[in-house]
Amino acid sequence: MAAGSTDTLRSASRANPALTRDGALPEGLPRPRGDVWEIPFSGEDLYELRQLVAAWASKEALGTEPTEELVLAVHEIATNSIRHGGGVGMLRLWRTGDELICEVQDAGYIRDRSVARRQPSRVASASRGLWITEQICDLVEISTSPQGSQVRMHKRLS
Amino acid sequence: MGAPEQLRIEPRQETDRVVLALTGELDMANAPLLQSAVEEPSLAGTKTVVLDLQGLTFLDSTGLRIILAAREQCWRRGQEFAVTQGSQQVQRLLSVTGVGEHLRTLASADEVLA
């Protein structure tokens, strides 16, 4: 789980040939400016991913409750990457003025984007990671195409 | 690494119920552990199954689905099913999904079902 190295990007490009050389999707969300921490992950890494997001968010002084929400959101979306998005993904973490942003990118295609917004039935809601994420983040941006998906989760610092 | 050892399940046989105490984190990686603990034949004869979530520090949507499946299985066996209140994170997932209000929830594992 080395962060931001060229090897990292190369392995992500191998996993997803649709990625451009800088690891972005051709028509994805705008690239963030400034420092971005990139962490490639696969099915074995969920536990460590949670630890890492929790440590980063608390270092950035996000409160306990919003940190737990952000950890759950990232975990749910990364779980989707592992289940439906080709088994691997890339987590990107950065901070803007007053927000922490976590983005998960993978090779999956979210065919029905309304799954993020439509209230699932009670039993189904337990399995709707995207819907849960929408409930616990301040903003969730989604870019998806047959080339891959980005889910960008925002959490305000105050 | 996201492995099954992140979750510990300790069954405790009491007079007419079995309490399964969960410690650690319940997610996609180790949800099958809970599934097999609930399918354990020795549970079939008891009147009530309680999942003690007090030691659970993390629960995700997969884990929640397994808890609901466990409840279904207990109901099919004609058993009562209840959980205890979990950590703040667990409570929040239960409330966000709306599942919490439909789960029989005990304040602690010592509480007996009425």
Image (tube, coloured by chain):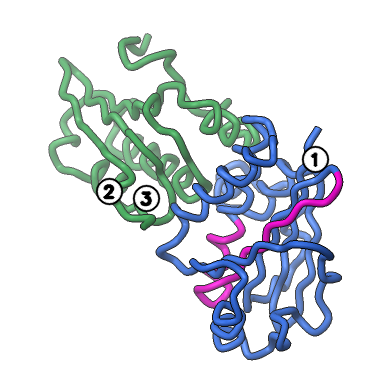
Q: According to the image, label 1 marks what residue?
A: A156
Residue A124 x/y as whole percent: 58, 49
Residue B31: assigned label: 3
Left or right of residue B112: residue A58: right
- Considering only order in the chain, which callout, 3 or 2, is on the residue closer to the N terminus? 2
Q: Residue at x 69, y 41 (%)?
A: A60
Q: Is residue A130 magenta?
A: no
Question: Of helix, strand and loop, which one carries label 1?
Answer: strand
Dot 1 crowding, Cα within 10 Å, few <14, some 14–19, many 20+: some
Label 1 – label 2 distance at C-alpha: 34 Å
Q: Which chain is green?
A: B
Q: Residue at x 46, y 54 (%)?
A: A48
Amino acid at dot 3: Ala
Determine which quarter of the picture holds residue A35: bottom right
Residue B48 x/y as whole percent: 28, 24
Seen from the viewer's position, the closer of residues A72 and A40 is: A40
Q: According to the image, label 2 marks what residue?
A: B5
Dot 2 crowding, Cα within 10 Å, few <14, some 14–19, many 20+: few
